[in-house]
Amino acid sequence: MSAKKKRLKYKTYRRLLSDEAHNQLVNMSINTDATLSKSEAVNNRVPTIEEILDSPIANFITLAAQDCGYTGTAEDLIVNYVHPLFLKAKANASSEDNPNWRQAMGGEFAEEYWQAAVKEIETLEKMGAWEVVEQSDDMNVIDSTWAFKLKRYPDGLVKKFKARFCARGDQQLQGIDFFETYAPVVQWTTIRLMLILEVLLGLKSKQGDVTAAFLHADIPEDENVYVRMPRGFEEYDNSGHQKVLKLKKTLYGLRQSPRAFWKYMTQKMEECGCKQSEFDPCLFISDKVICIIYVDDILFWAKDDQHIVDLAIQLRGKGVMLEQEDDAAGFLGVTLERHESGLLEMKQTGLIDRVIDALGLEDSNDKFTPSEGAPLVKNADGDPASGHFSYSSVVGMLLYLS
């Protein structure tokens, strides 16, 4: 048996283990709920950590942990990555703006999310991202999923609804489904430097968003990547079997997509006369415009707005589906206020309000020095910790603010 067939066989075996573990966890929840009294059922009880450790699913958790190199205890693994209560607490801070399919299609913005999904599929089909084929037994088909996003302005108001059709890159195998994956990300020092130059030189700034960015890059002809059709848009053959997509473009979620898009944009920028910087691979400089590429967002700076418009027209002529967003403020998630003196003041009141809401402190009294001067110590006789929020998410927001 060839090495490729062995890896595919191992991948199928691991997927069967994963499915079996998922079914056991679901059955465990159902069996547990069946033994509850009416009062307990109201509290929507879930399996305890001890029940999970004593169940057959513990074997699958241990196997997965060893396979990925996890060195902690089984209890820590379940608390941080498996137990539904802790996972729910971690997701609370962003679940409203990042719903899954069921939440998006059953919530108050169902129509907006559905229209965003329709627009996404229409855009992908227009770009020739795939061809629909009938599935055969020799195909290695990876799953697909929807990623929804409610984008907001810095002050928290709704900006737009986005739907992204993604491939399950976690099911890919290196050497079979993908090879190289590295793609650089712009340094924040570069962005800060450009903001300083904007103030000192009086530069104009614009932000552009590349529609379906990763779909601009092609998948090599010698690679065959098959993905299940998007939920809500399935097609079936005459025998009732669901068809699949043979990708022609690097879909979102594929391991190689970020690198392929970065190489694509580097080529297009150079064709438009923008030379790549030796100090930051995401910084491009032409005679009249300076650009920064951050994944699918592009920031432009120039002395004259028309120079930015001319470059954007050039990029569109090269096949880049570029849409104008706003100035640099939208990209950074901040509000930029220009004073008559020429100073540029950066405010993040919208993000600060979201941190306060995530912690449930919106009704609390404000204070100029909210932190205590004395060190925070543990009180063994005090009340137990309470509150359901993503601790890591809030810390990340505070670090970004600082």
Image (tube, rainbow, N blue to C red):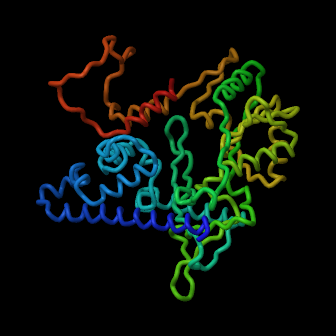
How many numbered marks have been drawn onto this rendered protein structure? 0
Where residue 127 sits, quadrant-wise, is bottom right
Left or right of 87? Residue 51 is left
Between residue 345 and residue 220, name the one nearer to us: 220
Q: Residue at x 14, y 63 (%)?
A: 35
Where residue 269 sits, quadrant-wise, is top right
Q: Position of residue 288 (x, y in %)?
A: 86, 32
Left or right of 23? Residue 246 is right
Image height of 305 relative to 167, above or below:
above
Between residue 364 and residue 2, name the one nearer to us: 2
Image height of 120 relative to 62, above or below:
below
Left or right of 246? Residue 95 is left
Image height of 375 relative to 262, above or below:
above
Q: Residue at x 84, y 38 (%)?
A: 274
Q: Residue at x 42, y 48 (%)?
A: 96
Between residue 234 and residue 331, name the one nearer to us: 234
Q: Position of residue 174 (x, y in %)?
A: 60, 56
Q: Residue furthest front?
A: 1
Where residue 3 sits, quadrant-wise, is bottom right
Q: Residue furthest top?
A: 373
Q: Residue at x 53, y 88 (%)?
A: 239
The quadrant of the rendering that contains the N terminus is: bottom right
Q: Position of residue 80 (x, y in %)?
A: 35, 43
Q: Position of residue 49 (x, y in %)?
A: 24, 49
Q: Residue furthest bottom?
A: 238
